[in-house]
Each structure stands twice: as structure tokens, then as C-alpha cells.
Image (cartoon, rainbow, N blue to C red):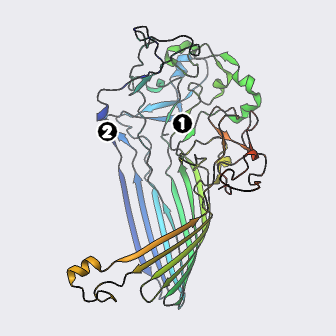
Amino acid sequence: MAEGWLQHFSASTQPLHWALILFTQIYHGLYLQDDWKATSKLTLNLGLRWDMQGAPTEKDNRMVYFDPTVVNPITALVNNGATYRGALVYASKGHRGLYRNSYTNFAPRVGFSYLVAKNLVARGGFGVFFPTSVLGTPSNEGYTSVTPFISSLDNGLSPAQTLNAAFSQGIRPITGNSLEGLTSLGQSTGSVVYQRASPYVEQWMFGFQYSPTRRDAVEVSYLGNHGVKMVTGNGVNLNQLNPKYLSLGTAALLNPVSNPFASQSAAFAGSPCSLDQPNVPAFQLLLPMPQYCDGVGSSFAPVGSSSYNALQTRYTHRVSNGLTVMATYTFAKSLSNVSGPEDWALLTPAVIRNYYDLAAERSVDSNDIPHSVVLSYIYPLPVGRGKKFGSSFNKPVDALLGGWQVSGISTFKEGVPLAIVSNSDPSLTFGGNQHVDVIGNPNSVTKKGFQQWFNPSAFGTPAAGSFGNARPSRSGLT
């Protein structure tokens, strides 16, 4: 039994005081506003807001951020004339924050209301907003450790480990911050980048409200917003292979070449991309940070942009018996480069496929709804004191049975876009799934139904060494 074959096992080690790790994040905000009645017809709303969302800190500085510009200490150890940039930087007493705090997030607001005629009012406004960002748990590489387990080296023919020697290479220790910039060499890594800009949204609207009668109101408005420096859900890969090398071809990129880090194999021990071996694939040395594997994530990178434009019409009618009916129609379009592509069932954001061409990621937003109709009503029931029924209720009975109302909302919306992606990496950038090629008309279906709603033959896998021409999300397929 002691020589049994281990097939499914892993080991992890972490500090005994893990439960005491404590992250703190502060937020400060200040808002000033004044309403000024400039004339009998014109009212102005003026405001200014200041926001400061502090960077997360940990009580014992057990967290790291990633700096793609700092010179990695491996440069001096290898000493081959090359400069290798990019390293994890640990929080310290004088540098505790996960990213640089911004103290200049001033957000002006301005609005107006103008009485054009007796029953006609014009309204408009513009404002800047700095939404708070939820970054999840900050990275604490070095303070946790997972030892990989390999069950077999020959596809299951014989065991590589046994019960009495399950981890022949030993358990990977917890290094804390002792390795400093050498932490996670030869691995995929990443964290929040320290030089992080503050995302913000510009919003505006302009519209008219017309009341032809005391009981009716019609509104027509234009609404829009522009997202700037928006964060990406899964970040971007800072170590993506530059597409300019794709012309070399698959064979050349995968061709084994001498590993310049081989003399420091101990620092790269257990590297899944073979940086602890004498040879590595040629593409590895062409990466922006070849001391790491191809995945160096910049979590919640503020590189995105978005836009939303909509025409909204609303009709409100109030009946004498208290019934209010409202109908709203919205025609809108939302574009972005950070919302997808997404898994249409789980709505899990995917990574940006080509960090060197963010414009190619721009498409209809995954939540884009071109047409929307909302019908709503509110009807106070005529039951209770002073009402048609129960006018003689005493106070306890009236408190129980009076004052009720019936309301309802019916919403009709066009479906959200669908993401069509390739489950392979034909771009050879070694960064995960990629866009597909559109080679036909996706809507060329004889009869749409549950079995087939669009033409799957309209999409194909791009040729090796190229990116697909499809945008992340497509409208009209749902």
C-alpha cells in the first residue's frame, strides 16, 4: 500500500496566521451643490464632487503589486547584457498601498430647467462621476504556496510519485517577501499595476416635457454617457507576444533555443513554461517579460472605454380615480471594449484578446439592448376611510384594510448580443481563446427556431498567425 500510485492530489502550504490577514481600504467624498433661480423661467443646478478611494492596505504589508517598468533583479544575476523589466513589488512601511492614490478626482455637475412655454419645459444636464472600484482580494504572492503534483510522465503508463515519496522534490515553501523581485519567476503572475488611473464616466441628457392636459405628460429625451479608463474584469495580459512576430510562423516560434536563464535554474524551479530547462521555445524570449510565462495579468486594468446613446420617450396618464399609467420606449446603442466577449450563460467576462489593438475589442456591449418598452401602472384601491368602500372603517380596521394599491410593470426588450469565440489560439499569441472569422451571413437561416436560430457555418477559425475579424459581441443573433 505504501507504494500505491497517487493520481489526484495536490498540496498547499500557507501561514498559520492566515486568518489574521486584514485588508483595509478608505473612501472620502465631498459634495457641494447650489440651486440658482437665474430668472423666472430658468433654474440652474450647480454642483462639484470630490472623491478619493484609497488603495487597499494590509496590516502587515503582506501584499504585492506589479510594476512592468522596474528592472527585475534577475538582470544582474544573468548578466548577459540584456535588461529584463517587470517584477512584483511588495508593500513596505513607506509604500503600503496597492496602487497610487489619486487626489484630483473632481467631478463637476451642471443642470438646468427652462420654461419654454406654459406647458413646455426643457431640461438638461452634464456630470462627471468616479464610480468606486471593487478590486477583490489583493494579491499576496509569496505568502501562500501550492506545490504542483505530477502523477505520470508517460501518459499514465507508470507512476511518477508514490505514497511514501509523493513530493520527491519537496514542498514548495512560503517565502514571504524574502525573494522580493525574484518572486514567481518562471511562472504566470500579475497583480494590480501601481500606476493606476481612476475610471470615470461622463453623463449628459437633454429633453422636453410637454403637458397637453392636467392629466397627461409627454417627455422626449436624449441621454448619453462616455466611460473613460474603465477597468477590465479579468485584466489584460502584459506579457502577450507582440503580433509583429506572428509572421515568423508557428515552426519558428516553437523552435527550441538556448535558455539565457538556465544558469539560474534554481530561481525558475518548477516553471510550467520550461524556464528552468536548457532550452525554451523561441517565442518565450520574444515576450515583453521573458522571465515570466506568457500570462502576466494586469488585474482591473483601466484601459477600457464605453459609450451609450439613447432616445427615450415617455407618456404618463393620470385618471380621475387615481389610476396612473406610464409607457416608456427607449432606442439605444451601447459600445465598449471591456465588457466581453462573455459566456452568454454565466456572464463571466473574458480577457482582452489583443492588448496591442484595443480598438479591435470594441463592439456592441454585452448588455446592449437596442429596443425596450416598459409599461407600468399604479392603482390605489378605493377601500378605506373616505373611499368608495369602507368609508366608515374605524382606525384599526382602516389601518389594516385601507391604503392598499395595485401596481405592475411589464417589460419588453430585444435580446442582448451573443459572443462567438474560438476555443483555440490561432493567433499564436499564447493568450487563450480568440476571435473567430466571419465568412458568411449569420442570419441566413431558412426558418429560425429552437433548433437553429443563426447560421453557425458563417463563422470559422482564423488561419494560424492571424486574429479573427469578428468583433467580441454581435447583435441580431438573439
> In terms of image quadrants, where is residue 449?
bottom right
- Between discs 1 and 2, the one toward the N terminus: 2
Q: Residues within 10 Å of mark 2 (few under 14, many from 20)?
A: few
Report the quarter where the N terminus lies: top left
- Residue found at the far right of this picture: 440
Query: Residue, x 68% and y 57% (percent of image)?
Result: 476
Q: Which residue is mark 2?
A: 22
Closer-to-camera residue (272/419) = 419
Query: Residue, x 40% and y 45% (percent of image)?
Result: 55
Query: Residue, x 74% and y 37% (percent of image)?
Result: 466
Q: Is residue 396 left or right of residue 276?
A: left
The local secondary structure at tag 2 comes to loop
Report the quarter where the C terminus lies: bottom right
Instruction: Point out residue 140 in the picture as x, y percentages from the top left corner.
Output: 41, 33
Q: In the drawing, what numbered circle is on residue 297?
A: 1
Q: Is residue 274 placed above or below 399 in the rendered structure? A: above
Q: Is residue 445 left or right of residue 148?
A: right
The local secondary structure at tag 1 comes to strand
Instruction: Point out residue 328 in the picture as x, y percentages from the top left corner.
Output: 55, 74
Q: Amino acid at mark 2?
A: Leu
Closer-to-camera residue (163/44) = 163
Q: Amino acid at mark 1?
A: Gly
The mark tally for this picture is 2
Q: Is residue 254 left or right of residue 383?
A: right
